[in-house]
Amino acid sequence: MSRPTRGQVLRSLAALPLLTSLRSTPVTTTSTLSASADRHAETLRGVRGPVFRPGDAGFAEEVAGFNAAFQPRPSLVVGATTADDVAAAVRYARATGAKARVQATGHGLSSDLAGTVLVTTKRLTGLRIDPRHRTATVGAGVRWKAVVDAAAEHGLAPLCGSSSQVGAVGYTLGGGHGSLGRRYGYAADHVRSLDVVTADGHRRHVDVLHHHDLFWALRGGRDGLAVVTSMTVDLVPVTRLHGGGIFHPGTSAKEVLHAWRTWAPTLPEHVSTSVALLRLPPDPALPEPLRGQFVVHVRFTSTGTAAEADRLLQPVRAAAPVLIDTIGEMPFTAIDSVHADPTRPMPVAQSGTGLRELCAGTLDAVLARADAASGSTLAMVELRLLGGALARQPRVPNAVTGRGAQFSLLGLGVLAGPGAERVPQQLHALTTTVQPWATAGPLNLAGGGDHSALWSAADRARLATVRHRHDPRGTLAP
């Protein structure tokens, strides 16, 4: 049987995420305030978007997030269409003593949101590209895909992550590192300004000159500070990459990971790479060499020349037999094909950490918890190379975590099907086994739970001060 071409593989991976997925339900966007509204309902009378209470038609569709492991149960939902809608929702939460929570795509959903006032911002889809100043002004509901496509028309690109289906604002507030990160830094390093609603229900413009404490905290601190309704970020002059992935058989995991460990730190800053152990579903839409298999996936992107990339890749291509190699020239608009992340909602749990180093002992510890003989049911265990510009503070410092980490480790499990009940324990075991080499890593890859240990004592105290100053009642508290 002949090996599939690169084009055939890319089309297959684009059509089917590498992990088991569930189909989403269309969102209903028409509803009205329930007749059983409480005495504070007057606060919401000017809201232009739909307002939902439990039991209303469209409530379940409105609150559904990308992570289907949770079924949100807020007491009230405001489908914001303007920043004023957001402000009204926050004032309502404050008046009723409820917590206000925000959701655009629900990729970061980590609880059932019980009893909260949920502001859904997916309708805030304003997007403006300024090619002269190389910036994009992005509404809170905009996904990176829209920014990638709009910026490409001007020969520019945003600092998005491995999936352009993720919401741009939430990704950026958590730091945000993707294929261009080692060259340009975190997405949060390139925020020019933010338009927000603070816990008192007032709209504010935040930048280096206005509310500078909040500007520092929001860029990397993410949660419990203010509701961002739009942001202005830098774009970079990138139009193409030499990138893709190399799939090796899972039986060669040890050889590939140890080759990757010594190879990755030698790469120049315009190159990014990660490696993942993947347990793929037996779906007929997947290429035959990958279908239902345990494989090693080396991901690679470079803004350098094709000739340089091919030379740099020689050690990992030679580390073990190659099942499929999709690496080649690509427009930046095809960035999703490198990782082939899921595009439809699915029930997942994840946990991650930063690593000070990746020595032979670290890798052996990871393999003991994740290779074919480990008994693991985790769908993905990934290592990413950090460093470069990700290790340096930007000109205007911010609260981004993980600058001291040289690598990140992430485990992800699907909470459905055989072995789902073992996923939480296996995630805990994975991050625990690398504790001798662990350090604070990127916030967006940390998973659920208490993240306070990611910051230094000084930054943790500074974040607490900013939160108390702008939200003394804890209306937005994480």
Image (cartoon, grey):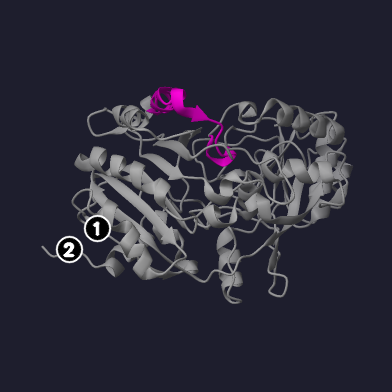
Q: Nearer the viewer, residue 121 or 265?
A: 265
Element assignment for label 1: strand
Left or right: 99 in relation to 389: right
Considering only order in the chain, which callout, 2 or 1, is on the residue closer to the N terminus?
2
Left or right: 95 in relation to 162: right
Picture residue at 27% right of the left edge, 33% below the top: 371
Residue 75: percent from left, percent from top = 71, 35
**Residue that badge 2 annotates:** 3
Mark 1 and mark 2 residues within 8 Å of each other at the beta carbon: yes
Span of residues in magenta: 423-446
Marks 1 and 2 sit apart, C-alpha to C-alpha, by 8 Å
Residue 21 lies within the magenta run: no
Residue 347: percent from left, percent from top = 45, 39
Q: Amino acid at mark 2?
A: Arg
Q: Amino acid at mark 1?
A: Ile
**Residue that badge 1 annotates:** 324
Q: Nearer the viewer, residue 300 or 345?
A: 300
Q: Nearer the viewer, residue 429 or 67?
A: 429
Residue 440 lies within the magenta run: yes
Q: Is residue 222 above or below residue 29?
A: above
Q: Is residue 359 above or below residue 315?
A: above
